[in-house]
Amino acid sequence: MSALLPETGRDMLHLRSPVRARQLLNRAAVIDRDRMTADCVRGFGFLANLTDDERTLAQDKYQREQAVADRLRARTCKGDAATHGVSF
């Protein structure tokens, strides 16, 4: 069973077709691969600098690492407070 698009009533499965996906791209647009790569590096570069606690939480699919989350929150709040001149 597939979902229908409310505005058209068309089946959403047609969007999965490779032919349909190609039709959604603007063929006249020039793709600047260097710019696209630079944007990705700039947008996701922080992932290379994650702390051990952040890596642990990123892999914690079932949110079982509550102590790590609490420790990271406490550290983050203290850093924000110091940055903004607030004390707890």
Image (cartoon, helix red, strand yellow):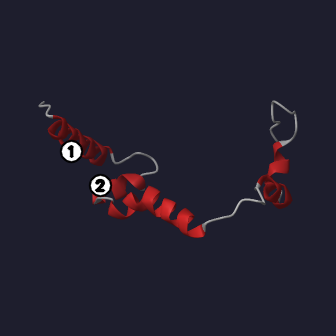
Q: Position of residue 34 (x, y in %)?
A: 55, 69
Does dot 2 land on a helix, a strand or a loop? helix
Query: Does the CB distance between marks 1 and 2 fall below 8 Å?
Result: yes
Residue visible at 80% across and 59% down in the picture: 22
Nearest-to-viewer mark from 1 and 2: 1
Residue type beneath disc 1: Arg
Q: CA distance from mark 1 to mark 2?
A: 11 Å
Q: Residue furthest left?
A: 87
Q: Position of residue 70 (x, y in %)?
A: 27, 41
Residue displayed at 13% across by 34% down:
85
52 is higher (above) or lower (below) than 3: below
Whether residue 57 sits left or right of residue 38 in the image: it is left
Q: Quadrant of residue 5?
A: top right
| Residue kind at label 2, given as amino acid type | Asp
Q: Is residue 41 left or right of residue 80?
A: right
Residue 20 image point, x, y percent:
84, 55
Nearer to us in this view, 63 or 48: 48
User: Which mark is drawn over residue 46?
Assistant: none
Vertical relation: 59 (above or below) 10? below
Q: Position of residue 33 (x, y in %)?
A: 59, 68
Residue corresponding to mark 1:
75
Q: Which residue is mark 2?
A: 53
Front in this rendered view, residue 3 or 10: 10
Image-based side of 69 in relation to 34, left or right: left
